[in-house]
Image (tube, rainbow, N blue to C red):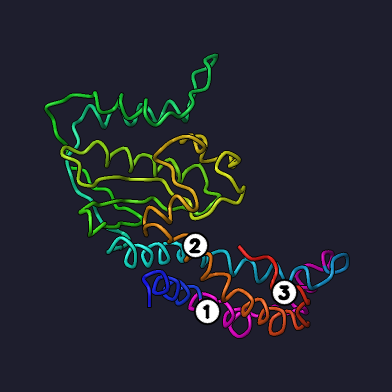
């Protein structure tokens, strides 16, 4: 079995475990009960078919678990690709006081524009250069807890990824930027690279990414510290990782769509069930 095949199977294990938990949740633990729905929202029930809200009931129980699943999938990719992956790893180092001050200055400028002044736009290279020019004799012990940590065993490199959902909010992104800036400011650096990463791009091409909230903190289309979709998977797992991920999802997608139609919605699947692949 090739490494790509092993990675694909490992990815499928994570997704199947999550989907089986969700199916048990919506079928056994917390099913959609139309009588309850009609009693709680009589106006909605009078105007909209129950099936619409039954779909919403499933969606809410699907989206939340996928947040933690992305980290598990990333760790699988790192273990099978680069050689080692983990989550919640603490990176400890020292940052001089002036660099820490400049980090806060940059974050404040991005968040609050002075009245009458032009809004400050993020520019990773310019910001990092300014921070690293900060000098101070005072070194402050600093700890950064990363979302995903990976080691490239072959090349002896260490990477950190702030991994967020494809449409992250502003507060999450601000925290991630602060953490990444601190990692690059440590003397000496404790890692070889840190990135703000999104597992896929709902807009298709990177040039078309248009979600406004993270754009307050990063130039999502140009900053080299930002990885979206295939850029992230190839970085954490090596060449071929994104294809393995796509193949893994597509292979098991039809099975779960079929189950959702039959077991949850109680209807026959459409004939074009196999369409809509990644």
203 w.r.t. 71: above or below: above
Element at badge 2?
helix
Residue 36 locus on image (x, y percent): 74, 77
Judge the density around disc 3: few (<14), some (14-19), many (≥20) Cα neighbours within 10 Å.
Answer: some
Q: Nearer the viewer, residue 58 or 248?
A: 248
Left or right? Give the position of 56 relative to 67.
right
Seen from the viewer's position, the closer of residues 250 and 25 is 250
Which quadrant holds residue 210? Answer: top right
Which numbered disc, 2 or 3, marks the residue that appears first in the sequence? Answer: 2
Range drawn in magenta: 16-44
- What distance separates the C-alpha of mark 1 from that of mark 2? 26 Å
Name the quarter where the N terminus is drawn: bottom left
Q: Earlier in the sequence, mark 1 or mark 3?
A: 1
Q: Nearer the viewer, mark 1 or mark 3?
A: 3
The one nearer the camera, 14 or 102, is 14
Q: Is residue 35 magenta?
A: yes
Q: Residue at x 88, y 68 (%)?
A: 46
- Residue 127, image x, y percentages: 36, 27
Look at the numbered disc 3 and give the secondary structure of its residue. loop
> Where is mark 1, residue-wise?
21
As helix, strand or loop, the secondary structure at mark 1 comes to helix
Residue visible at 72% across and 84% down?
A: 262
Q: Which residue is mark 2?
A: 243
Residue 134 image point, x, y percent: 23, 24
Q: CA distance from mark 1 to mark 3?
A: 22 Å
- Residue linked to disc 3: 273
Q: CA distance from mark 2 to mark 3?
A: 21 Å
Question: How far across and down, in percent of the image, does residue 268 sit?
Answer: 78, 82
User: Could you classify mark 2 by the number of other residues whose Cα lies within 10 Å: few (under 14), some (14-19), or many (20 or more)?
Assistant: some
Asked if the stretch drawn in magenta spans residue 41, the answer is yes
Observer-side mark, 1 or 2, equals 2
């Amino acid at each position: 079995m090739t490494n790509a095949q092993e990675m694909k199977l490992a990815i499928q294990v994570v997704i199947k475990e999550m989907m089986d938990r969700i199916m048990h949740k919506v079928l056994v633990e917390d099913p959609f009960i139309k009588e309850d729905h009609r009693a709680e929202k009589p106006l909605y029930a009078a105007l909209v078919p129950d099936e619409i809200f039954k779909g919403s009931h499933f969606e809410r129980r699907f989206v939340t678990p996928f947040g933690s699943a992305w980290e598990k999938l990333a760790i699988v990719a790192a273990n099978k690709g680069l050689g080692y992956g983990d989550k919640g790893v603490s990176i400890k180092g020292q940052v001089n006081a002036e660099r820490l001050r400049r980090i806060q200055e940059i974050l404040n400028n991005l968040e609050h524009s002075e009245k009458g002044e032009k809004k400050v736009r993020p520019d990773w290279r310019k910001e990092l250069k300014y921070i690293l020019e900060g000098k101070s004799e005072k070194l402050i012990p600093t700890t950064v807890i990363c979302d995903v940590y990976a080691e490239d065993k072959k090349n002896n490199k260490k990477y950190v990824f702030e991994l967020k959902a494809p449409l992250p909010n502003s507060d999450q992104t601000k925290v991630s930027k602060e953490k990444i800036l601190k990692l690059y400011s440590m003397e000496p650096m404790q890692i070889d690279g840190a990135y703000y990463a999104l597992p896929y791009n709902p807009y298709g091409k990177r040039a078309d990414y248009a979600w406004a909230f993270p754009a307050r903190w990063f130039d999502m289309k140009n900053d080299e510290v930002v990885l979206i979709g295939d850029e992230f998977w190839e970085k954490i797992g090596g060449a071929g990782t994104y294809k393995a991920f796509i193949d893994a999802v597509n292979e098991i997608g039809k099975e779960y769509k079929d189950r959702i139609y039959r077991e949850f919605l109680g209807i026959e699947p459409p004939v074009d069930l196999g369409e809509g692949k990644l």
